[in-house]
Amino acid sequence: MQRALAEDLGQDGDITTDSVIPADRQATGVIAARKQGVVAGIPIALRIFQTIDSSVRVVVKLQDGARVAPGAVLMEVSGSARSLLKAERVCLNFLGHLSGIATATAEIADAIAHTKAKVCDTRKTTPGLRVLEKYAVRCGGGANHRMGLYDMVLIKDNHIAAAGGVAQAIRAAKAAVRPGIKIEVEVDTLAQLDEAMTVGVDQILLDNMGPALLKEAVARVAGRAVTEASGSITKATAPAIAEAGVDVISVGWITHSAPCLDLGLDFTA
């Protein structure tokens, strides 16, 4: 947040606002939704206004995770007009981005609500914003996958190729990591799945499999590991994938490509 404000204000601050708005001018405004969605980032927006000017008064009307219709007021702000304008864009950038992630997550979560599957994120996040983006996923009703390379073993295709095979990679991981660290392996075929299950893992990533193949894979796992489906999953394709019986659907685009939720700050006085 501090870096975002410094990026926007630079050395000379808001030269437009400071040259146009009298220093003693007070203003009142609202931040409101212009489209339907799910809110995320309210505490960050509040902190931005307080960082710019501790005398700015903010009344929070909705909490993170709230579903909003166009026109819904997220917060009311009042104080120095200069301060409100200096905080406006950074505040809306965070709110819009995180609310967009929460909204995209909620759309998939709603689409698979009739199944046991949960939608989760990946490591495909904006550099430096991973914690916030994964928080936004939770606001939208999703779950978090591993936070980084350090908290879970995920053996992917290149690991398998370099290690000499699925079983070899799993055995090496089991011998190396400390107790309590979960091990997941990505498989592309049922043959790889069978090989993985002979060694045993905590979680299986079933990559780019259609619903019929996923259903067969879930049957072969038979509850011995958490099953995760991944690969170009959309709101339209998610229901059939979830209905195949997987436990988790991981979706990278909800963090790296979710459109911002359209929000605006408008002065009312």
Image (cartoon, rainbow, N blue to C red):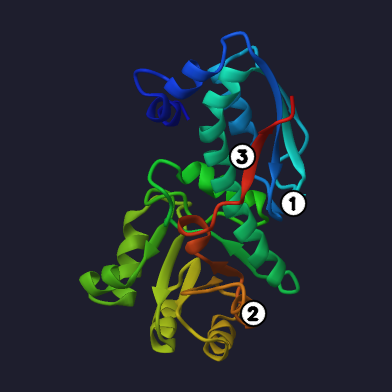
Instruction: Residue 135: give x, y in percent of width and height.
Output: 58, 45
Total number of numbered labels? 3
Residue at x 47%, y 54% (from the top left corner): 146
Q: Earlier in the sequence, mark 2 or mark 3?
A: 3
The residue tagged 2 is 245
Q: Is residue 104 above or below residue 245?
A: above
> Where residue 41 is drawn, which disc sits there?
3
- Could one spot residue 14 in this view of the protein? no
Q: Is residue 170 above or below residue 31?
A: below
> Where residue 70 is drawn, which disc sits there?
1
Q: Quadrant of residue 240?
A: bottom right
Q: Earlier in the sequence, mark 1 or mark 2?
A: 1
**Neighbour class for label 3 at 10 Å: few (<14), some, many (≥20)?**
many
Viewer-proximal residue, 268 or 44? 268
Question: Real-space Cα distance between discs 2 and 3?
Answer: 33 Å
**Neighbour class for label 2 at 10 Å: few (<14), some, many (≥20)?**
many
**Neighbour class for label 1 at 10 Å: few (<14), some, many (≥20)?**
few
Amino acid on which the number 3 mark rests in the picture = Gly
Amino acid on which the number 2 mark rests in the picture = Gly
Q: Quadrant of residue 75?
A: top right
Instruction: Residue 27: give x, y in percent of width and height.
Output: 68, 20
